[in-house]
Image (tube, rainbow, N blue to C red):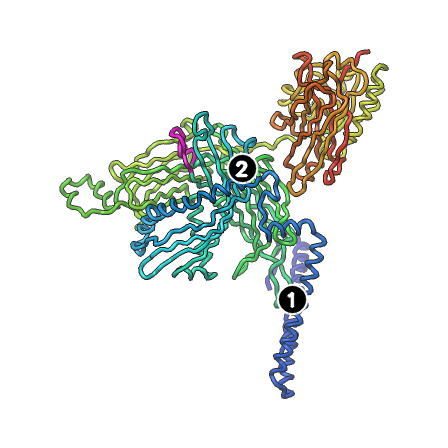
């Protein structure tokens, strides 16, 4: 029994207490072990005593078997009943989620059924069906002319390999859904996401080495392909090139024939399919892409391997309430788990350390991933219980990295999927890629400060083998001696990149002195001034070196755009051996999250009404009453910052002047500020703050609007939250009795800000309705936001005149702020809201 030594510097009393606690703990452990042993012994007696009794009484062994069968039947029947009752209870408790998951999994419904922004593509399926036989002809030619020679050269045992039959069947792949991105991307590109499902009757036979044959008869492939059309140009064919790839690894199932039907066994099928998936991933899974340039001006290297979108830094902090997988005493006693996490982005996967016997583990580890597509790529987090035989699954969670890019920083608990309970705590940061060397700040905690992107294009005049390099190093033999040497075939070469301990390898190119790779690689850099990129060209079978290049990373700091794109001579290689590559260094910069601007109405609305001159008292009271309906007292964190200090105090100094009118540059307690407006409502500060991007500096309302008496009209809005799609939907239905800006009515439109998002990018507006004071818009706007966040935010809605009275006058003819925390977003609300104009100065 181990003793606890006293801590250095501890008092005698503390030592005695530690020893007492240790003895108490050890005694309880001994008692627990004794109880487990007694329970095990008692269970063994209960099992073997009937056998002994049967032999003692001289009964037949058939009675023992009959009793065992009865007990087994009873246990199975009891388990079946318990499972049925448990399923019924779970269905009642989670009816909506259960139906949704069953429909999605069992019926294999297309994505457009669940997400309305995904469309059906029946026309595209008809095109594929018509073109499929010709695709089969193309694939047959490619397999026999391109793939077959490569297979023969890859191994001496496959020199007789040949395809005897290639038929891609009559069943084409189906596009189950298509989604187009146009507004969220650059204006010179179009992005399409295609959900593809292929269950084909493929029939391919090959002779490996007589009499050994191999073949495939039927396969299943399912995944999502992203197609990028860029750049859009002003001449035929309107698109400069087409790029397509799988964002995530697709699922693959193969039915083998011939001698390879041994691979159908569970021990070999996963190995073979994984190997084939690795080949597909090396060609078509991010960061690898298939590119088809359509015009000569397009650079293939930029299409095939563009710079990544950014880097996400994942802090794997902890987990809680994990499922216990370890059991003792034949399942009678439940223990804990030995959890570890596996994180994956694209083709990069990392594993955390294992925490022994803990259902609330704390890891505190940091991982960094290169993000090539956001939105699109996902962070896949899987938790396992480590065991000696097979690790048990204890939950997973997938997070679209587009959310991290939008939020810049996330720190929250995520509910694990695939298990009854359990959560994982992650902190995520989005790092942008900058080409400004002045931003370089090397980290002291082992985190990367920069990212190196390398595009390997091709090599030329590689030596055939190491002997040719040795001859060159011995100062060039006589040409006559060279002609007498044995002829050596062209080398099978690959390139090995390394920065310190991190090593990455290219594909092998067979039998070529001028190999073309066209592959991209990324490395995280921790010290730009001391680290260097080491490149080695090697022969495939012998692993001998055919060339060497060392590139100090500090050299990139002084180049234009921190990029080198050129041919480099190879050391320890042939006389004219070169390699062409492009290396770009980018500084990792932590982006600050967007400011969370919160709103609260002024605390003394009654005093403001009493200070209004007599001629405007009615209007002010009406404004307060109308505003109270849509903006109640502060009830959420969104309004915490807008306290009695006013709008000016809530903004940093460097953001005040460009956006705020002059009346807000002074303290709210100053006399000039109090006398600025004769009439103010609860919406005054809030609407002015949220509408500031639309206003001219110091602009006033038109004279006709300032002299108007009575109501400014109403606006009807419908607000609801789509739970399955996780979107807030706002419908601008209509307005009535708005202010007439001319004899024929008003050319009006509605502008919406989803507070606190107040920039031009987040501005939403309807189309214009001309010459009417009762416009009907029926425009719908959607916001990607969780229900919890939506209930803490507000809508700033403004009705505007499309034709200005004067170029220096404001366009607003009515405003309202809708507090979403006061609405039942699940059921949806359709309501008329009174329009007001805060800060309107009325003539006496």
Residue 145 badge: none
Name the residue located 39 percent from the left edge and 28 percent from the top edge: 297
Describe the element under mark 1 as helix, strand or loop. loop
Give the residues in magenta: 291-303
The percent position of residue 663, horizontal first and vertical second, equals: 71, 17
Describe the element under mark 2 as helix, strand or loop. loop
Q: Is residue 147 above or below residue 776?
A: below
Q: Nearer the viewer, mark 2 or mark 1?
A: 2
Disc 1 target residue: 332
415 or 172, which lies in front? 172
Q: Is residue 377 shown left or right of residue 689?
A: left
Q: Is residue 287 shown left or right of residue 69?
A: left
The percent position of residue 546, horizontal first and vertical second, equals: 29, 43
Q: Residues within 10 Å of mark 1 (few under 14, many from 20)?
A: few
Q: Please tell me in which quadrant of the rendered image residue 816 appears.
A: top right
805 or 770, which lies in front? 770
Q: Quadrant of the C terminus?
A: top right
Name the residue located 72 percent from the left edge and 27 percent from the top edge: 734
């Amino acid at each position: 029994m181990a003793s606890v030594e006293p801590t250095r510097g501890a008092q005698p009393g503390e030592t005695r207490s530690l020893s007492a606690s240790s003895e108490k703990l050890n005694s309880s452990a001994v008692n627990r072990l004794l109880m487990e042993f007694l329970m095990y012994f008692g269970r063994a007696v209960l099992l073997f005593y009937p056998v002994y009794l049967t032999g003692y009484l001289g009964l037949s062994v058939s009675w023992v078997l009959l009793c065992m069968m009865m007990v087994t039947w009873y246990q199975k029947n009891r388990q079946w009943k318990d499972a049925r009752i448990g399923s019924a209870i779970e269905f009642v408790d989670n009816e909506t989620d259960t139906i949704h998951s069953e429909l999605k999994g069992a019926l294999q419904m297309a994505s457009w059924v669940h997400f309305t922004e995904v469309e059906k593509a029946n026309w595209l399926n008809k095109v594929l069906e018509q073109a499929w036989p010709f695709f089969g002809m193309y694939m047959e030619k490619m397999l026999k002319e391109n793939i077959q020679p490569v297979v023969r050269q890859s191994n001496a045992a496959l020199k007789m390999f040949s395809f005897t039959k290639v038929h891609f069947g009559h069943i084409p792949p189906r596009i189950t859904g298509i989604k187009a991105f146009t507004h969220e991307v650059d204006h010179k590109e179009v992005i399409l996401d295609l959900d593809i499902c292929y269950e084909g009757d493929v029939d391919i036979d090959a002779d490996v080495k007589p009499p050994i044959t191999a073949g495939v008869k039927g396969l299943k492939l399912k995944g999502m392909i992203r197609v990028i059309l860029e750049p859009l140009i002003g001449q035929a064919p309107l698109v400069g090139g087409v790029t397509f790839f799988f964002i995530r690894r697709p699922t693959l199932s193969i039915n083998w024939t011939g001698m390879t039907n041994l691979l159908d066994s569970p021990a070999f099928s996963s190995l073979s399919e994984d190997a084939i998936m690795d080949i597909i991933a090396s060609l078509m899974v991010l960061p690898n892409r298939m590119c088809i340039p359509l015009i000569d001006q397009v650079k293939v290297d930029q299409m095939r391997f563009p710079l990544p979108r950014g880097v996400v830094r994942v802090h794997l902090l902890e987990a809680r309430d994990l499922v216990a997988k370890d059991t003792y005493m034949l399942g009678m006693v439940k223990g804990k788990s030995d959890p570890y996490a596996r994180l994956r982005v694209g083709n990069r996967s990392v594993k955390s350390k294992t925490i022994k016997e803990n259902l609330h583990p704390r890891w505190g580890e940091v991982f960094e991933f290169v993000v090539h597509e956001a939105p699109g790529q996902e962070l896949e987090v899987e938790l396992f219980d480590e065991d000696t035989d097979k690790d048990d699954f204890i939950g997973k969670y997938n997070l679209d990295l587009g959310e991290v890019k939008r939020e810049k920083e996330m720190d929250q608990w995520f509910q694990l999927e695939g298990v009854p309970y359990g959560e994982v705590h992650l902190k995520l940061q989005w790092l942008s890629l900058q080409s400004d060397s002045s931003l370089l700040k090397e980290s002291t905690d082992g985190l990367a400060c920069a990212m190196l992107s390398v595009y390997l294009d091709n090599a030329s005049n590689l030596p055939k083998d190491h002997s040719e390099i040795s001859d060159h190093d011995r100062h060039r033999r006589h040409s006559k001696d060279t002609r007498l040497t044995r002829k050596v075939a062209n080398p099978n070469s690959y390139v090995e990149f390394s920065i310190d301990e991190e090593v990455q390898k290219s594909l092998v190119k067979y039998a070529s002195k001028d190999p073309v790779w066209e592959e991209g690689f990324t490395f995280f850099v921790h010290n730009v001034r001391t680290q260097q990129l080491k490149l080695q060209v090697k022969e495939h079978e012998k692993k001998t070196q055919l060339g060497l290049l060392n590139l100090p990373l500090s050299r990139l700091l002084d180049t234009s755009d921190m990029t080198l794109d050129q041919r480099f001579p190879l050391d320890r290689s042939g006389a004219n051996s070169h390699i062409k590559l492009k290396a770009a260094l980018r500084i990792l910069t932590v982006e600050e999250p967007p400011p969370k601007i919160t709103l609260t109405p002024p605390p003394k609305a009654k005093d403001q009404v009493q200070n209004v001159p007599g001629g405007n008292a009615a209007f002010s009271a009406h404004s307060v009453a109308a505003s109270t309906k849509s903006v109640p007292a502060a009830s959420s964190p969104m309004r915490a910052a807008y306290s009695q200090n006013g709008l000016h105090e809530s903004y940093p100094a460097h953001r005040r002047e460009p956006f705020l009118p002059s009346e807000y540059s002074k303290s709210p307690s100053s006399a000039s500020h109090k006398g600025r407006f004769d009439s103010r409502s609860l919406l005054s500060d809030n609407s002015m703050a949220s509408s500031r991007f639309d206003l001219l500096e110091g602009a006033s309302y038109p004279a006709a609007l300032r002299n108007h008496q009575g109501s400014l009209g109403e606006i009807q809005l419908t607000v609801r939250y789509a739970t399955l799609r996780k979107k807030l939907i706002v419908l601008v239905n209509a307005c009535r009795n708005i202010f007439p800006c001319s004899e024929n009515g008003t050319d009006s439109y509605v502008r919406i800000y989803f507070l606190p998002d107040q920039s031009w990018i987040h501005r939403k507006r309807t189309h214009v309705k001309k010459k009417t004071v009762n416009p009907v818009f029926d425009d719908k706007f959607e916001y990607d936001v969780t229900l919890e966040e939506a209930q803490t935010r507000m809508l700033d809605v403004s009705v505007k005149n499309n034709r200005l009275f004067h170029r220096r006058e404001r366009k607003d003819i009515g405003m309202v702020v809708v507090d979403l925390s006061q609405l039942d977003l699940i059921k949806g609300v359709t309501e008329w809201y009174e329009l007001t104009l805060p800060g309107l100065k009325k003539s006496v």
